[in-house]
Every structure is written in structure tokens, then in C-alpha cells.
Image: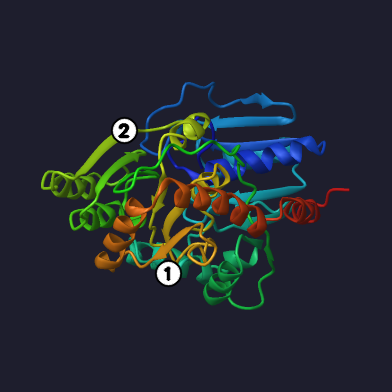
Amino acid sequence: QYFLPAYKAGGPIQSIKNLAAFLSKKGKEVYIYCSDRDLDNSKLDVMLDSWTTFSDNIFVYYCSENNRGRKSLALLLANVKPDIIFINGLYSLQYTIYPLLYGGCKKILSVRGMLHPGALSQKRLKKRVYLNCIKMFRLHKLCSYHATTDEEVGYIINEFGANVAIQMIPNLPNELEYTLPPVKTIGDVGIVSIALISPMKNTLRVIQALKACKSKIRYSIYGPVKDRGYWEECLTEISDLPNNIHIEYKGEVRPEDVAGVLSKYHFFILPSKSENFGHAIYEAMSAGRPVITSHNTPWNGLNDQNAGYNIDPDNLSELSSVLDDIASSSDAEYKSSCESARRYVESKYNLSEVKTAYKSMFQLN
């Protein structure tokens, strides 16, 4: 549904950008059909309702509101004659259901974490009705599925049954260069989050946990506000902070500026209810920043590897203790964690194997 220059939807846009770049370098023409809007419904400064060249072998069709519909999409697909349709996401009539109904080629649906219990708990009734309709009309039988973790394979089976075809291949992420960490003073720490501001990302939990901390902690929040009511709750908590805690909202950050932002802080924090992949988490560790996140992401075992912490975001005392703990670390201890974070992400993710798997999925030589 979203593609560059849109960026506020976060990880799914990066996933498609990286996958399209990989396929184009293998000599395949990639056609991306998407909305002319960003996540907040702001209009993109793009040419509408025609194929435009994004880069070598990559073409994008930014569809205006007036041109949406099954017939118009069917005409586009008939002209392109795709070998494979890769559907990015689950909950859309225009960008999921209509492509599924096109009968001219193989279709792969990437659910992008949308069947994770944490994701299903948000707007639960609406999603339940939608998924039941998909199964009632047997639309789930019209495609194979792409999962990015073994856990997600299980979620797909739980929802659509064991007879559907599933390929498990992790996302293609952006690997950032390792950046020298800032000097760390005992009793003082700078933490940062880069994410949509919504209940899924647990920004409010971080703020609430900080109120009980004794150390000097600076917390910078980057990302678009997805849920205005939730952000108002955050602001209420921010207005009642102790003097040792300083929180600042920095606004949105474009993907090309992420490395520069990360370089200014000691730790990255994102205790999400769930993450299908967690592009921001991967990028932070690849840049050499230890991470504080939940247990509901692919990035577990951080404590054992000295690469950060996995915590329960509903346990505020645990999170407060971790935040005070990272503030109390010395510069030498902190730099050791930075190096461990980079090693952890390199050992956890085998890019060569992932690329080979995508070549197989898209039937590349």
C-alpha cells in the first residue's frame, strides 16, 4: 500500500524497497503498485496514475483515490503480465483482496507480522471479521504465503490451516556501518526510539518506567504519531517527570538520516508488543548500538550476548531497573556492549542464505 517517498509506515516500506532492489539487480523488472499517500494520508509529490521509473528495472504506479478499483487494477496487471504478484500485507481491499482475485499468475502473500497475537489484539473485532470473510470466500486458497520467522509460520497455520503453502525467509534489511559510540559517563545515558508512536510500540511504557528511575536519563523519541489519543497519554506522563529525566519528541526521521540519529545515542529502545522483523532494531545493532526490546521480536537472547536486554514491557519495575542499570555502566562496559550488538546481529542473520532463498522464491537462475 505504501512505497517511497512515503516512509511513515516504517518497516514494510523498507522491506519492499530492499526486495525490489535485490530483484532488479538480478535482471528482473519490478512493478510496484501503491497508494499516492503516506501513512498519515498526506499526499506524495509524485506523478499519479502512470508507470514512473524509480530506478533501474523498478517502476512504480502511484494510484490516486479516483483510480482505485478492481477493474483498473486488472487492466494494469493485464498490460504488465506479471510472472508473480507479491502482496505486501493483509488488511486491504485494494492492495490485498483485488490482487488475490487476479487469476493470471502465481501470487505470494507476505503477512508482515499482521497475524501475530500482539498485532491481532489491536482493533481485534474488525480484523476478526475481515479474516473470517477471507476464509468464508476461500480467498486464502488463492496464494502461497511468505513468513519471515518460524513463529510467523505457526501464526499462518493457526489462521489458515496446515494445507497452505508457506515459505519462511527473513526480511532483507538495511545494514548500517558501525559508528563510533559516544562517550559514556557513569550515571548518565542517552536512549532513543525510532518508530511509529502507537500502542504497539509501547512508548508510554518507557515513559512510565522512566518516572521511577534514579539515574540521569535522556530519552529522544523519533517517529510519526499514528495514534493521537495515545500520544496525548504520553504527553500527560511527560509533563510529570522527575528532574533527572529529560524526554524530547524529535519528530519524524527519513530513512537516510537514521544512521546519523543513532550515532548520537548510547542505547536504542523499542519494547514492542510484537515485531515481525524490526528493521529499526536491526539497523541499531548493525550500527553498534545495544537494544532494549521485548521478548516478542526475532531478536531474543540479547542479555546472554551482552547485546542489550529483552524485557517484559508490562513489568515496569523490570524496565526501570534495566534503564538504571544501563545508566550505571562505565564507558568500557558500554563499548563492549556496542561491539557485542554488532557481532550478535551478524551471527543471527546470514544475508547470503537469505538472498539464495529469495532467488528460489522468485524463480531466479
Secondary element type, mark 1: helix
Where is residue 202 drawn, in percent x and y? 32, 56
> Which tag, 2 or 1, sits closer to the chain's start?
1
Quarter assignment of residue 75:
top right
Residue corresponding to mark 1: 117
Residue type indicated by callout 2? Lys
Identified at 68% across, 59% down, the residue is 169
In the rendered structure, the answer to whether residue 158 lies left or right of residue 129 reads: right
In the rendered image, the vertical position of residue 231 relative to residue 44, given as above or below: below
Residue at 22% x, 56% y is 213
Amino acid marked by disc 1:
Pro
Q: Which residue is mark 2?
A: 250
Q: Quadrant of residue 79?
A: top right
Say few, some or many: other residues with alpha carbon within 10 Å of mark 2 (under 14 / 14 to 19 / 20 or more). Answer: few
- Where is residue 132 shown, x and y percent of the image? 46, 70
> Can you tell which of label 2 and label 1 is closer to the viewer?
2
Q: Is residue 207 above or below residue 309?
A: above
**Is 214 in front, or is 94?**
214
Numbered disc total: 2
For the point 45% across and 49% down, the residue is: 334
Q: Position of residue 280 (x, y in %)?
A: 49, 46
Front-most of 7 and 30? 7
